[in-house]
Image (cartoon, grey):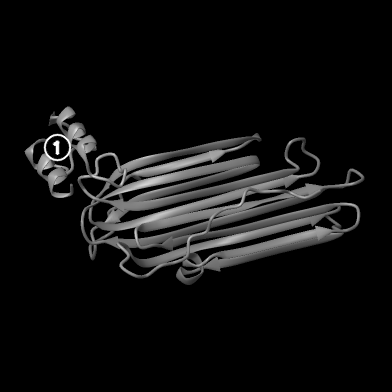
Amino acid sequence: MLLVLPTLFHVATIAIAAPFMPTNAGGSTYVFTITGPWGTPTCQISNSQVLGLEEILAVFQDEATCDDGISSTHAFTAGQIAITETGLAAFVDGGGYAYDGNGTDAFSRHDYLATVDVDSEIDRRIRIDWSLYASGLGSVFTTVKRLGNIGGPSDPSEPIFDIAVNAYIFPIIDEGIEVLRMPAGRWRCTIMSTHQSHSGKKGFQQGVAQLEHSVTVVALGDVDGSGVVDITDLLAVIGAWGACNTCLEDLDGDGLVGVGDILQVIADW
């Protein structure tokens, strides 16, 4: 039996006029498959890889397969955090299956973890488009958080973006759009995916854990992140007029929606 997965669109790494400069990266992958008894397996394959900046900015993938003629297992993983002309584009795609023909154990697992640190030299406004999918015993998550000032000590803040799905047999799909302020500083994007498949557990014979998300820089005056600064953004600022510490309409982040924010919308019109 073959596991059929959705096709993901992979964004190539682009270094021209990128708003973010990568400064550090780290991560790892692991794939494991086994058929037959744990003590005396008929097949056992495992691969692990430490990921650096080069592997994470490019698409890195790995897989392992066992098939002893009675049982078959497969685990795979692929992922990337790309620097693009408009921001960041990340994906991770992982999963596998475990089937047996006579009640003998079969098992597979994958893990993928990657982080990229970037410098953003000015205050920005970003739009994050995200989609996550998991099934079987699969989990996937992604975060974006500030680490501190450029050239300064580590001073991590709570993530401005933090989303995860954890499946238990039944598929889970989650997607959405967030428009957020991104103050100047050092930032980290993290993506993670894992699954386990077990032939003897109903509903766990196959699993998937996937995500895609993009971080797109938009104009400061683009309140709704639509890519166009127009009357909708102006009306949004007017509608939120007054004191507001967390409003997205507070374009300059001074805790007050006022004349300065109106002028920012007009400047970016």
Q: Image quadrant of residue 29? A: bottom right
**Number of numbered tags placed on the structure image:** 1
Q: What residue type is labelled 1?
A: Gly
Task: Tell me: residue 69, above or below residue 224.
Answer: below
Which residue is located at x 38 percent, y 44 percent?
A: 161
Question: In the picture shown, does residue 133 fall above or below 41?
Answer: above
Q: What residue sits right under mark 1 in the picture?
A: 255
* Res 63 seen here: yes
Task: Please rate how many residues cluster around mark 1, counting C-alpha atoms within 10 Å: few if below 14, some from 14 to 19, many from 20.
Answer: some
Give the side of residue 127 with respect to residue 10, left or right: left
Identify which residue, 81 or 108, lies in the foreground. 81
Outermost residue, left side: 259
Q: Toward the viewer: 84 or 110?
A: 84
Residue 91 picture location, percent across and down: 51, 54
- The percent coordinates of residue 63 (x first, y second) are 68, 61
Tell me the residue at 21%/32% (across/down): 236
Q: Residue at x 68, y 44 (%)?
A: 207
Q: Where is residue 246 in the image (x, y as percent from the top left)?
A: 23, 35
